[in-house]
Image (cartoon, helix red, strand yellow):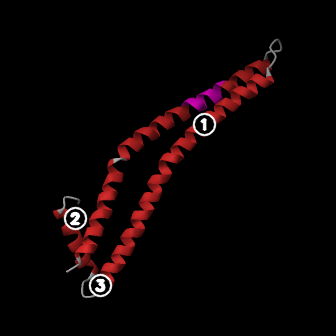
């Protein structure tokens, strides 16, 4: 039989994993919001480009370079800001998932070392059964 401390660690890993998964709806919603903002920025860039093109074709209109440059920088800044927000949201998730994966591998190694008489299938079954009993599978 697998030592209780290893089963408790498996339970903690699974609970943390499930918390991350349950928060995915929030992250998906926020990602869609950022995607919409980026689409709007692309539309602004397209409109900006069209306006510059039209102004350059019309001999009676002069292009205000400073104003155009400021407008372009604002659009680029907005894109960069949204990208950073998305990155700031995703990085902690990735770090936590990597941490859980490492913990899981280390836990599995320790279980194998301390239970040389159990096969891989037996180990998986015992841990899985425990997770089911805890309502975590």
**Which is more N-terminal, label 1 or label 3?**
1
Q: Which mark is residue 114?
A: 3
Marks 3 & 1, CB-CB < 8 Å contact = no
How many labels, in total? 3
The residue beneath circle 1 is 79
Q: Assess disc 3: are there few (<14), some (14-19) or many (≥20) residues with their C-alpha within 10 Å of its C-alpha.
A: some
Towards the viewer: 100 or 75: 100
Q: Quadrant of residue 40?
A: top right
What residue sits 46% from the left and 35% below the top? 33
Give the Cα distance between marks 3 and 2.
20 Å
Q: Mark 3 to mark 1: distance in Å?
A: 52 Å
Secondary structure under badge 3? helix
Q: Residue furthest left?
A: 133
Circles 1 and 2: CB atoms closer than 8 Å:
no
| Chief SS of the magenta region | helix
Q: At 74% from the left edge and 19% from the top edge, which residue is drawn?
A: 54
- Left or right: 71, with 126 as reference point: right
Q: Earlier in the sequence, mark 1 or mark 2?
A: 1
Residue extending furthest toward the top = 60
Of 113 and 64, nearer the camera is 113
Quadrant in the picture for the C terminus:
bottom left
Q: Earlier in the sequence, mark 3 or mark 2?
A: 3
Residue 110, horizontal then vertical, whole percent? 34, 79
In magenta, the rendered stretch is 40-47
């Amino acid at each position: 039989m697998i030592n209780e401390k290893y089963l408790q660690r498996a339970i903690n890993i699974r609970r943390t994993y499930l918390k991350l998964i349950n928060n995915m709806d929030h992250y998906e919603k926020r990602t869609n919001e950022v995607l919409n903002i980026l689409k709007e920025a692309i539309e602004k860039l397209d409109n900006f480009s069209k306006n510059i093109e039209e102004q350059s074709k019309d001999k009676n209109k002069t292009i205000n370079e400073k104003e155009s440059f400021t407008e372009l920088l604002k659009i680029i800044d907005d894109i960069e800001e949204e990208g950073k927000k998305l990155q700031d949201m995703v990085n902690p998730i990735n770090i936590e998932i990597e941490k859980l994966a490492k913990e899981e591998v280390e836990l599995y190694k320790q279980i194998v070392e301390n239970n040389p008489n159990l096969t891989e299938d037996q180990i998986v079954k015992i841990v899985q059964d425990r997770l089911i009993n805890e309502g975590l599978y």
